[in-house]
């Protein structure tokens, strides 16, 4: 590990100024990715900028309309320990509660999970299924984008060198909808997704036909993947096993996984389908339980 | 008399015999007597006055670091086995 | 659960809290990484990025100039090693290979092979300096799999290695097959010709690691008078001393090894890796030097156990196993010395089989040099034979346990090497399994199945030495030289308490360094509670004798007129009974002849082999291939369970390691010989959430070779799980897996015909 400086700005302005000082910067949110990478010489920097002293980064707000705004560095534990948020966004909690264990969750953030841009990041498919958006800021101003547009490749995201991820925004969820996220791991804990799937299902008012689904996959391509074809395959159909199998098929077809020590191409394509079906079943169950 | 159990790879030295009854009051004497019947046997087991590192001698089923002059009681069984270690 | 009758013992069989427990749970116990000495600096090693290469040149000049650097080391700093075998306490070691494995000289033989070392004021300075060392390699193609390595055209790890036969013959051409051994009896071909049913299969297992939590470490101080002190995590401080003495060509008496607490070993902490490096860095820098491995170093450059390939053919006639033909090929890693001999020797030991031919091949590959791992060699062999027996039982319509019972080895049965078994407990284990609540319960539900398997481990005796000093308050300091991995302070103190008729908590056990107690072999081979227990018993008898002498002196009678029992010395005459308690005699030691000290020093014989039979229920997710262990029962002949909780702990621990080996663990290599999963994230050992409560059924068949009937218990529990789980998966899915691990990937690919 090389030596680096530690900076702890107390405002966004200070942080932007530090980002612009010409030195190689890395951000420190929870540090559960970046510290490990620095120690293992997988990343290098001249200065590590701690985001946890910036109020905007640590805020969390549920608007009266049911929109959730989470500061990018907010620890996961503080999110899932909020009963109201847990009740309204169970799929978000599905992912927040499986990222590492209690110690990791007390430090780790959604912002770090997303910016680290691992194809297996657990928050990505969940947030994509929930149609979340990201607020990005720099000294030049702010911009917004859907989560699914944020990932460019393994370890690469859409931020410019002078930009920070400020907020994750989860919109109010549609009526008659339910969402679910899960991953497949060989063990029951302490593992990284071999493949994962998040799904949101919205039914018509009668609860008989599918109005829309949002299916997203993790660890089966260079980036988390939005399966648009799943929606096309099932829209207007009854929420049955046969219908879900069509969505599963669309997921498997879109997946372009690799073979590595965590899984094979054939296994991951197969899992893309299995996990999609099971995520839709889980989402449907939640929808039904709420009504 | 003690019984020597001849390991499969050394049976050629002993005309194919799998067991031999041989006299010997100590391990050394026994192996020398076996060698008289099966020329070359002694050298396969003993080197520089010690049991070769790749094999072990078991007396009555007990493999141990025996001295060459370990006394043998009549009716003892002596086996040559590959050396093994435990974890 | 235990199946004993009423115990004749007072302390043995109880479950006191271990003497080292409080220090360990409060974090006060000192491990190797906790060593901090005045002036101490930090050593790190440079490791080969290539699996197979010649070292053409090493230039350390730039590293030497880096800030904070006080010493740089290469193999040139080591004394020239002799190319000869030497018995160093746990199997024979080739001294040149031992030295080359610590710091490579001419060739690197696996990725992670150490080539140089740096000591600097901080660990980070040492790491940065390593980057400045220039090593010129001539890269060679690696050979990573045992079957590939045996091909005549395979890249050779060494041009001077020839296949050695037990006859002393050598192969004509150099080969990666270091040696061949054979066990043979009867007429195998004739028996196959007459068999009712035959199973013939190839079984493979991958290289796996012991997975101890604590990485290797060594701190050394090369003192001004030429003596060396080493603080380290080891299973055997005396073996470290012997190996360091040989590698450094330094007199054994000038080396003192202080064993720190040990965070797991399972056989992997018998060889040395860092100790001579720390010592020479200390010599060069004039400072104490601490060297630590990272987890990746541990995976890539310590001593895992062999990947194996076993071709097996088994025949039965009228329910009797009549013929076995087996070819076992085990990866030794970079240098010769796999546990194939043990695998071949133990494979058939639960059974009485007339006709067999077993051939074993010890094969070098471009992977770390294997070392012992819990019952080394036996689990892979049992995986093969116990899987085949399961298939045969199905073929002939026999209950798999009844088949094992019918063919069981008993007293007098000859093992494949020809030795006759003494009293053994395999049949009792099978009976207990047949009668267990688990085996009698139905296995119901889709995708569920049950499997059974047996296993054998030979157990070791070897040398132990203890001293027990009586304090004036009637307590006893027990000084032992066996490092305590699995609760042996407790199990040894309990045996001394039993011998002396004293309560457990008056015995104070201490693990001493190599200057402070007689020679002890390693804590390994399931020997410590057995062999050091015998030494402790001997020391206890020695104290008893002295206690009687002291009391007799005071009463003016001959020592043999008094008796010792229950911690008291008694003189009984027709007219009166006189008594003195242990504490009373201890208090007066000064006036009756001075300190009372007992000693026990011996080579333990009569270890007595261990048998186990396991039952497991699994459920297989047919869509993901994930196997869940629903229920696990391990029946084992444990001799006498000194501390039943720790015996159960050994059994449970062995089973958990077996579950990991069966389901997920493997060294996963890319084609260049790089291990791609050298972290606990991707090297998937089971966590507490992956295993159910493991029910240990202790069958107590006392070992006649030990005063308290002790048998080694630590190793055999890892032998049956691999096959038991494969058999359960076959029962659940109808698919027979003959390759480990049976990971979700392999299972789902097989069930769905994916790959
Ligand atoms: C033991 C362990 C278990 C884990 N288990 C899981 C798991 O199950 N699932 C999973 O998905 N991950 C897991 N992780 C990885 C990690 O914990 C998560 O990715 C976590 O969410 C990262 O968040 P963080 O706040 O710690 O990020 P940090 O490490 O602080 O930052 C990660 C990266 O993002 C950048 N960054 C952070 N915040 C911002 C920002 N606001 N703007 C711009 N750049 C930013 C940093 O520069 C850095 O490159 C695990 C890690 C460990 C150590």
Image (cartoon, coloured by chain):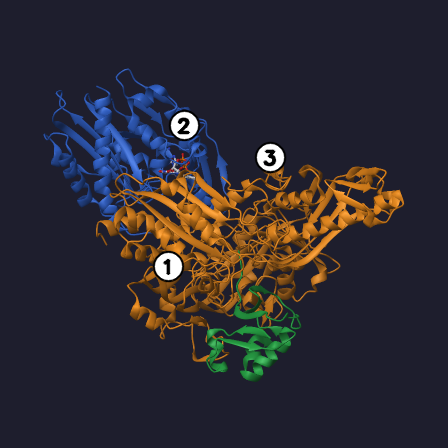
Q: Is residue B20 above or below residue B65?
A: below
- Please give the name of the residue rendered at 37% of the width and 56% of the height, measured from the top-left corner: C386
Secondary structure beneath label 1: helix
At which x and y percent is residue C748? 26, 48
The N terminus of chain B, quarter of image: bottom right
- The colour chain C appears in is orange
Q: Which residue is mark 2?
A: A77
Give the SS element for disc 3.
loop
Colour blue maps to chain: A
Considering only vertical position in the picture, is C40 above or below B61? above
Hey, which quadrant is residue A95 in on the image? top left
- The nearer-to-camera label among 2 and 1 is 1
Question: What is the CA distance from the residue labelled 3 to the residue labelled 2?
Answer: 27 Å
- What residue appears at the point 37 percent right and 66 percent down from the top-left corner? C324
Chain of residue at mark 1? C
Chain shown green: that is B
Q: Which residue is mark 3?
A: C26
Q: Nearer the viewer, mark 3 or mark 2?
A: 3
Left or right of C83, for residue A164: left
Q: Chain under label 2?
A: A
Residue C396 is situated, as x and y percent measured from the top left of the image, at 28, 57
């Amino acid at each position: 590990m090389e030596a680096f400086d530690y900076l702890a700005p107390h405002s966004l302005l200070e942080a932007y100024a530090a980002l612009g000082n010409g030195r190689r910067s890395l951000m420190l949110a929870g540090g559960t990715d970046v510290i490990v990478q620095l120690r293992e010489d997988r990343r290098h920097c001249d200065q590590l900028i701690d985001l946890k002293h910036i109020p905007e980064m640590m805020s969390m707000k549920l608007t009266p309309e049911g929109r959730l705004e989470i500061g990018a560095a907010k620890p996961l534990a503080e999110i899932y320990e909020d009963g109201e948020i847990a009740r309204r966004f169970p799929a978000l909690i599905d992912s927040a509660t499986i990222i590492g264990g209690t110690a990791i969750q007390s430090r780790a953030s959604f912002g770090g999970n997303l910016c680290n841009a691992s194809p297996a990041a657990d928050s990505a498919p969940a947030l994509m299924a929930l149609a979340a958006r990201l607020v990005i800021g720099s000294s030049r101003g702010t911009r917004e984008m859907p989560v699914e547009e944020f990932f460019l490749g393994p370890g690469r995201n859409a931020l410019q060198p002078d930009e920070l991820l400020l907020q994750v925004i989860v919109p109010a969820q549609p009526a008659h909808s339910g969402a679910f996220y899960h991953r497949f791991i060989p063990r029951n804990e302490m593992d990284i997704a071999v493949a994962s799937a998040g799904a949101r299902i919205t039914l018509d008012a009668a609860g008989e036909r599918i109005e829309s689904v949002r299916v997203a996959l993790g660890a089966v391509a260079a980036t988390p993947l939005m399966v648009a074809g799943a929606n096309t395959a099932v829209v207007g159909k009854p929420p049955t096993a046969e219908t879900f199998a069509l969505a599963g098929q669309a997921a498997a077809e879109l997946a372009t996984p690799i073979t590595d020590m965590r899984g094979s191409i054939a296994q991951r394509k197969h899992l893309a389908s299995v996990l999609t079906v099971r995520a839709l079943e889980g989402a449907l169950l939640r929808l039904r339980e709420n009504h | 008399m003690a019984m020597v159990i001849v390991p499969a790879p050394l049976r050629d030295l002993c005309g194919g015999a799998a067991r031999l009854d041989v006299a010997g009051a100590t391990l050394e004497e026994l192996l020398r007597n076996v060698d008289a019947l099966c020329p070359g046997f002694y050298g396969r087991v003993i080197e520089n006055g010690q049991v070769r590192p790749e094999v072990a001698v078991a007396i009555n089923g007990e493999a141990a670091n025996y001295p060459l002059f370990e006394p043998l009681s009549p009716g003892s069984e002596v086996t040559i086995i590959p050396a093994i270690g435990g974890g | 659960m235990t199946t004993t009758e009423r115990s004749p013992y007072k302390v043995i069989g109880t479950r006191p809290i271990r003497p080292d427990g409080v220090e360990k749970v409060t974090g006060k116990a000192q491990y190797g990484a906790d060593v901090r000495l005045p002036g101490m600096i930090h050593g790190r090693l440079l490791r080969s990025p290539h699996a197979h290469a010649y070292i053409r040149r090493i230039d350390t000049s730039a590293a030497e100039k880096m800030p904070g650097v006080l010493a740089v080391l290469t193999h040139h700093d080591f004394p020239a090693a002799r190319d000869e075998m030497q018995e160093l306490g746990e199997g024979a070691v080739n001294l040149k290979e031992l030295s080359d494995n610590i710091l490579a000289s001419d060739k690197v033989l696996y990725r992670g092979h150490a080539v140089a070392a740096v000591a600097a004021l901080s660990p980070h300075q040492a790491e940065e300096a390593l980057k400045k060392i220039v090593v010129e390699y001539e890269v060679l193609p690696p050979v990573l799999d045992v079957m590939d390595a045996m091909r005549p055209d395979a890249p050779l790890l060494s041009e001077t290695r020839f296949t050695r036969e037990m006859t002393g013959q050598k192969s004509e051409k150099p080969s990666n097959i270091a040696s061949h051994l054979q066990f043979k009896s009867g007429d195998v071909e004739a028996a196959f010709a007459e068999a009712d049913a035959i199973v013939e299969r190839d079984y493979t297992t991958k290289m796996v690691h012991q997975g101890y939590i604590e990485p290797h470490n060594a701190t050394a101080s090369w003192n001004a008078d030429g003596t060396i002190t080493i603080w380290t995590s080891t299973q055997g401080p005396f073996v470290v001393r012997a190996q360091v003495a040989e590698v450094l060509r330094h007199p054994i008496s000038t080396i003192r090894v202080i064993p720190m607490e040990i965070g797991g070993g399972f056989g992997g902490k018998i060889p040395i890796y860092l100790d001579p490096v720390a010592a020479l860095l200390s010599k060069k820098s004039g400072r104490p030097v601490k060297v630590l491995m990272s987890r990746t170093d541990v995976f890539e450059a310590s001593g895992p156990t062999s990947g194996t390939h076993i071709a097996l053919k088994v025949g039965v006639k009228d329910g009797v196993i009549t013929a076995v033909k087996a070819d076992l090929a085990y990866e030794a890693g970079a240098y010769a010395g796999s546990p194939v001999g043990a695998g071949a020797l133990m494979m058939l030991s639960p059974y009485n089989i007339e006709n067999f031919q077993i051939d074993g091949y010890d094969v070098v590959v471009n992977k770390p040099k294997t070392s012992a791992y819990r019952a080394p060699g036996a689990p892979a062999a049992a995986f093969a034979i116990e899987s085949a027996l399961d298939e045969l039982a199905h073929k002939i319509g026999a209950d798999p346990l009844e088949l094992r019972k019918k063919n069981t080895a008993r007293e007098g049965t000859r093992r494949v090497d020809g030795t006759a078994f003494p009293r053994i407990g395999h049949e009792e284990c099978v009976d207990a399994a047949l009668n267990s609540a688990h085996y009698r319960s139905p296995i119901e539900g889709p995708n569920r199945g049950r499997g059974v398997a047996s296993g054998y481990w030979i157990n070791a005796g070897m040398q132990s030495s203890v001293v027990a000093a009586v304090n004036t308050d009637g307590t006893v300091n027990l000084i032992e030289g066996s490092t305590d991995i699995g609760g042996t302070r407790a199990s040894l103190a309990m045996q001394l308490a039993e011998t002396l008729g004293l309560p457990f908590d008056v015995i104070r056990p201490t693990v001493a360094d190599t200057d402070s107690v007689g020679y002890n072999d390693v804590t390994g081979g399931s020997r410590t509670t057995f062999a050091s227990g015998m030494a402790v018993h001997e020391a206890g008898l020695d104290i008893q004798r002295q206690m009687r002498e002291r009391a007799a002196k005071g009463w003016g009678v001959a020592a043999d007129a008094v008796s010792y029992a229950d911690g008291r010395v008694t003189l009984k005459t027709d007219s009166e009974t006189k008594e003195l308690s242990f504490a009373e005699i201890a208090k007066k030691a000064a006036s009756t002849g001075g300190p009372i000290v007992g000693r026990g020093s011996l080579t333990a014989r009569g270890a007595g082999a261990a048998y186990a039979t396991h039952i497991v229920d699994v459920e297989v997710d047919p869509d993901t291939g994930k196997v869940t262990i629903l229920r696990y029962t391990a029946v084992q002949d444990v001799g006498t369970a000194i501390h039943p909780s720790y015996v159960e702990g050994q059994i449970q621990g062995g089973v958990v390691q077996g579950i990991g080996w069966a389901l997920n663990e493997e060294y996963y290599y890319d084609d260049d010989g790089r291990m791609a999963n050298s972290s606990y994230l991707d090297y998937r050992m089971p966590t507490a959430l992956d295993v159910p409560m493991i029910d240990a059924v202790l069958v107590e068949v006392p070992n006649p070779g030990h005063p308290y009937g002790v048998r080694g218990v630590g190793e055999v529990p890892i032998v049956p799980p691999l096959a038991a789980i494969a058999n359960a998966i076959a029962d659940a899915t109808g698919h027979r897996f003959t390759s480990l691990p049976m990971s979700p990937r392999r299972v789902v690919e097989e069930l769905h015909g994916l790959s």
